[in-house]
Amino acid sequence: MPENIQNKLNISQIADKLLKDASVRFSKCEVENLLKLFSKCSRDAEKMDRMRFRDVLHNMFEMTDDMLMDRTFKAFDRDNDSLISKEEWVKGMSIYLKGSLEEQAKFCFDVYSMSAVNATESVISREDIHSMLKHCLVKQPTEEDPDEGVKDLVDLMLKKMDFDKDGRLSYEEYRRSVVEDPLLLEAFGPCLPCPKTRLVFLRSIEDPKMKKNNGNSGEVVAAAAESKLRPVP
Ligand SMILES: [Ca+2]
Ligand SMILES: [Ca+2]
């Protein structure tokens, strides 16, 4: 069998397998296009390394912040082998681009939480919040001591979100805060695509037949509605 036909068959089989998972919110054509993009970006490697994944975030989602790109990589890398598999890529993109509020809350929590209580439970510690907010704020120099401002902000965020007052945010506390106020989803730094880059990316992987039929008006309305929910960076 010629190599390109074998290749198409492989992509179709992997897509079918991934589509059995209800959490994958893509059509078959979209999954196949995502898999082709994966092969292109990973230069046909079975798994994508951190640098190539960062190129995707930078080139396709306009991310520029090193720390947030590395943390986003970590959130996609579910099995923690420091590589992104095709399955992690498609499932991660599904949450990144089309996830429910709950799914995106889990994703953002994984991006933000660097501290662990034990092997199975991670938290967002006071130090995590401090380093992320400081990272965002140093880009806007002010007359005042920036560290003081950051400390006030950390206290403010903990006052709002740390329900049991133990000085750190569990997933449950973060999730509850986000459900009450979706603006808190990206409270500690932008880690989801903005409505514009999201739409451009989704258009690039959609089925050409769908493009003709719906003209994407639904997506545009959804993107506009979503932009109102997002905090101004
Ligand atoms: Ca992995
Ligand atoms: Ca707490």
Image (spheres, rainbow, N blue to C red):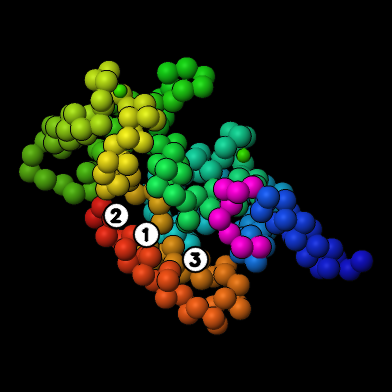
Name the foreground residue: 224 vs 60: 224
User: What type is the residue that disc 1 sits on?
Assistant: Cys
N-term mark: 2 or 3: 3
Q: Residue at coordinates 29% horizontally, 32% vertically from top-left?
A: 129
**Residue 104 pos. (x, y %):** 43, 46
Residue picked out by circle 2: 230
Q: CA distance from mark 3 to mark 1?
A: 11 Å
N-term mark: 2 or 1: 1
Residue picked out by circle 1: 194
Please report the bounds of the magenta region as a residue range: 21-28
Question: Does mark 3's beta carbon lie closer than 8 Å to ligand 1?
Answer: no
Q: CA distance from mark 2 to mark 3?
A: 18 Å
Left or right placement of residue 51 versus residue 31 in this view: left
Q: CA distance from mark 2 to mark 1?
A: 8 Å
Q: Is residue 31 above or below residue 132?
A: below
User: What type is the residue that disc 3 sits on?
Assistant: Phe
Q: Which mark is residue 201?
A: 3
Left or right placement of residue 217 versus residue 21 in this view: left
N-term mark: 3 or 1: 1
Ligand 2 is found in the corner quadrant, namely top left
**Residue 58 pos. (x, y %):** 46, 57
Q: Quadrant of residue 211?
A: bottom right
Confirm or deny contact between disc 2 and disc 3 (CB under 8 A). no
Circle 1 residues within 10 Å: few <14, some 14–19, many ≥20: some
Circle 3 residues within 10 Å: few <14, some 14–19, many ≥20: some
Magenta span includes 25: yes
User: What type is the residue that disc 2 sits on?
Assistant: Arg
Name the foreground residue: 1 vs 177: 177
Confirm or deny contact between disc 2 and disc 1 (CB under 8 A). yes
Q: Residue furthest left?
A: 143
Q: Residue at coordinates 57% horizontally, 70% vertically from top-left?
A: 206
What element does badge 1 sit on?
Answer: loop
